Amino acid sequence: MKITEYIKENILYLDGGLGTLLQAEGLAPGELPELWNITHAEKIRKIHRDYYNSGSNLVNTNTFGANILKFSKEELEKIVCSAIANVRAAAEESVATQPKWVALDIGPTGRMLKPYGDFDFEDAVAVFAETVKLGAKYGADVIFIETMNDSYETKAALLAAKENSSLPVFVSNAYGADGKLMTGASPAAMVALLEGMGADAIGVNCSLGPKALGAVVEEYLRYASVPVILKPNAGLPKVVGSKTVYDVMPEEFAVDVCELIGKGVRAAGGCCGTTPEYISALTRASADIKPVETTKKNITCVSSYTHAVVFDEEPVLIGERINPTGKKRFKEALKAHDIDYILKEGIAQEEKGVHILDVNVGLPEIDEVEMIKTAVCELQAITNLPLQIDTSDPKAMEAALRRYNGKAMINSINGKKESMEAVLPLAKKYGGLVVALTLDESGIPASAEGRLEIAKKILAEAEKYGIEKEDIIFDPLALTISADNKAARETLRAVRLIRTELGCHTSLGVSNVSFGLPERDMVNGTFFALALSGGLSAAIMNPYSAEMMKTYRTYRALAGFDDNCAEYIEFASSMPKQVSVAAETRTQTSQKEEFASELQRAVVKGLKEQAAKLTLSMLAENAPLDIVQCEIIPALNTVGVGFENKTVYLPQLLMSAEAAKAAFEVIKANMSGEKSTNKCAFVIATVKGDIHDIGKNIVKLLLENYGFAVTDLGRDVAPEAVAAEAVRLRAPLVGLSALMTTTVPAMEETIVLLRKEAPWCKIVVGGAVLNREYADAIGADKYAADAMETVRYAEEINESLGK
Amino acid sequence: MENTVYTKIYAPPHLNKREILRYAGVRGDAPELEALIDACIAEAEREVACKVCFAYFSVKSDGETLDLGFTKTNSVHLRKNLLGCESIVLFAATVGLGIDRLITRYSKVSPVKALIFQAIGAERIESLCEVFACDVQKECDESGLTVRPRFSPGYGDLPLEIQKEIFAVLDCPRKIGLSLNSSLLMSPTKSVTAIIGITSE
């Protein structure tokens, strides 16, 4: 019988801990337990046999750390081969009669994935792939991925298992006492990610005892449509006399696990501190429990690295601003590879309260595959919102879905055969909630019924790929009422029909409805309200639109989703009021005397929003460059001198720099055609191996304020990349930073290469481990102790260029 | 019990605002920063998850090589620090990845906040180490033992390479979600590994 069939009818018993038993057998601290498969095969086999004899159906191989990071390819093959043979032999030797299977055990690599570590996602996939291939080759029945405390690494392992074997895959994560993975994922988020990618059973192991894991397990049971695994520790270790013992004894352990079996757990065993005695107690205690059926939950959701967003009664807002269509500044940013601009757009929308970010970075003149991959990776490092991948290029879609840390929204498919054939396989492989537009080869049907028919066709096609209807969300397409006055009515009817006839959720790009009309915001807000009352689940919208946000907040209060109307009241109190503006102006005037102008005061005091506002109003009567030269630069100098004299501290210097930057942004936006005051090019990077870039970012900000054309290569940058950019721009200045003593050699290497490839450029270095002598020793032109010193040096070099 | 690795989860220690200011580069009064720093502290508090894993080892020295029970080293400075010690506590502590995320996020939109989160993270991990060291001290008091100041890889002549051995023996990734990258940097970055000597002298 197949294990996936068996688990449908029975409780599947797993094994217990291995580490403590190996230590008792003499495994020394720091010694690699995986080698014991070869050197102490009989001891390993006996432990496996004891587990089968105590009632385990599925016993894991001793391969927790068996990967090519720790072993050579030849060693690894020997280890996996003998590990599987050991379990297989134990199963045959065991006198117990229950069905028995062998699981290839896969634990985490111990390396942190980028961007918070230095291990690339694809490298992680490749490492797991090696072990999986060997497991399949030597006849494991199941791949058992366990003790993962990072969602991203879990995804890498599951992807490797799926791509390199056809075996069933069980996935178990290690949760902290806070009910989350170390990197932040909630159980619901993990269920969405793992089920989306087709894991056969999912659950939790390690960390805590069965009682303490209860809440997490119940979350799994609430969301999961596949069998749930539980493999807890025997509590926590404590010292009794001179021995270490775990504080939950076998009988108590069995009772606690049985309680969760009674709630629906279908695969149970133990982790650290548990022994065959625990499994015996468990199998005895649970013998009479009737397994609870695993039911389909039909939940429509997406997830990020932290949480799931469920589509249900409460409306979901999808921010539409990461999209170059009709946005000049956004297009410029894309062409200049200015990722920070995209990230800021994401953060700003998050702060406005959207739940999901749409990501569209398609432009004819850029490599969309690379760009969307970068944008997804960078966005998921700084926002915890789920992403909606918005591209018509299937290659870009795959690149983004592959790297996405969660279950993404896929925007979009439609009823055309070509579209479904290209995207549905990706949705099946990587998981995702597919946005399906109700149009096909013959266009958009005018009637709601016509759109419903296309929706049915799409559902039928999706089913062929094994994609169920809860993973499809329909967009019945909002068309402009200025062209057809029945357009909105039909769209609203389609929303209702799809909801009632198909039981599916809907999403709309609301703002299309008002195209061609004046004061579009008003029309959009009302249309949104009508659609919500007709059962719309989500809207792709502009969160800066006051009317849309008013509709959303009031709808939530009216529909009973806002307890005590608390969110509404907070929203209402944040609406701009005329009175406070007047008050603000008065206080400003009273303090005006100290400063040459209000703008200078705003910059010196680090008041970002005021600086932007004042700049905008000054632009009415002043030339942009005059504002820079006569207002912003003098204010920055005041602060800079204060910093050098130690009357102003670093945070205040930065606040001013940020305010100045806000002013510059306004000026930039109003300076079409005019030549900017840019000084020479300055290439800046944190050297290879180093990921500490706060100092570098500070220097960059100040240099930009002083008008330098800064190219920021980021952190962990290879010497070749720095040299190539310096040559490409023929940059007169290069700045390098390093925080760790271990990365100073990389800095020296970069300098050596720069001297060879770009002998004209001056190199300034900084960072916590450096000092003047050190900088001289590695051949830099200048050591700068802080950001201001870098600015002064850069100004000096810039002036010398003019001479 | 020797060699067993224990894990402790701590509530966030009492916050030292003066230290945060110091780490942020403020050397005097800066009342206008108060509001900003308080807002950052409130945001950071939700993200801090304090964890420590540790194990006890016997320590021996032949006057040149120091046998720490899990590895050997010729570090003169550590030998001096551990002079007269019979055993050590080896520990790894972290305040979690949340602070790293805040720093990364704000480095895109507000470098001043990134700087302050950096400072908060530095203060948090130092305070956590202090609390842990206090616990060790208390336990030793009961047995009439005393402890030495904690000593980390990279101090004096103790090489950073020893991190590899520490991570192997403490099983940091599994116990507290702490990992080591190829240039021996820790992730989460707001983390510390150290040795505390225990002596009956």
Image: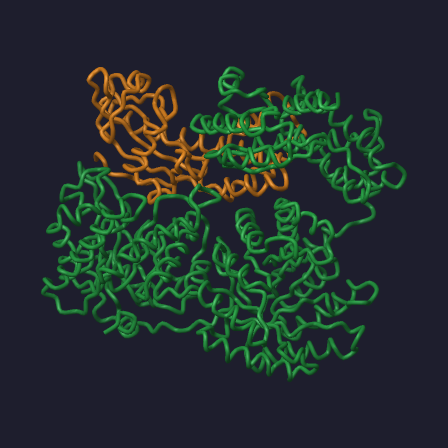
Q: What is the residue that sits farthest to the right in this orientation?
A: A621
Q: Is residue A2 left or right of residue A381?
A: left
Q: Is residue A727 above or below residue B157?
A: below
- Percent position of residue A469, x then y: 50, 75
Where does the C terminus of chain A fall, quadrant-wise? top right
Q: Is residue B5 above or below residue A165?
A: above
Front-most of A597 and A397?
A: A397
**Quadrant in the rendering for residue A696:** top right
- Percent position of residue A373, x then y: 54, 53
Image mark count: 0
Image point (38%, 19%), residue name: B156
Q: Is residue A405 left or right of residue A533?
A: left
Q: Is residue A210 above or below residue A635?
A: below
Of the chain colours in the picture, the one used for chain B is orange
Q: Is residue A603 left or right of residue A785?
A: right
Give the image's coloring scheme: by chain
Image point (74%, 33%), residue name: A678
Instruction: Answer yes or no: is residue A366 visible.
Output: yes
- Percent position of residue A722, x then y: 55, 34
Image point (55%, 52%), residue name: A370
- Percent position of residue A597, x then y: 84, 30
Front-most of A210 and B76?
A: B76
Instruction: Answer yes or no: is residue A180 visible.
Output: no
Q: Which chain is green?
A: A
Where does the N terminus of chain A fall, quadrant-wise? bottom left
Front-most of A71 and A33?
A: A71
**Quadrant in the rendering for residue A413:** bottom right
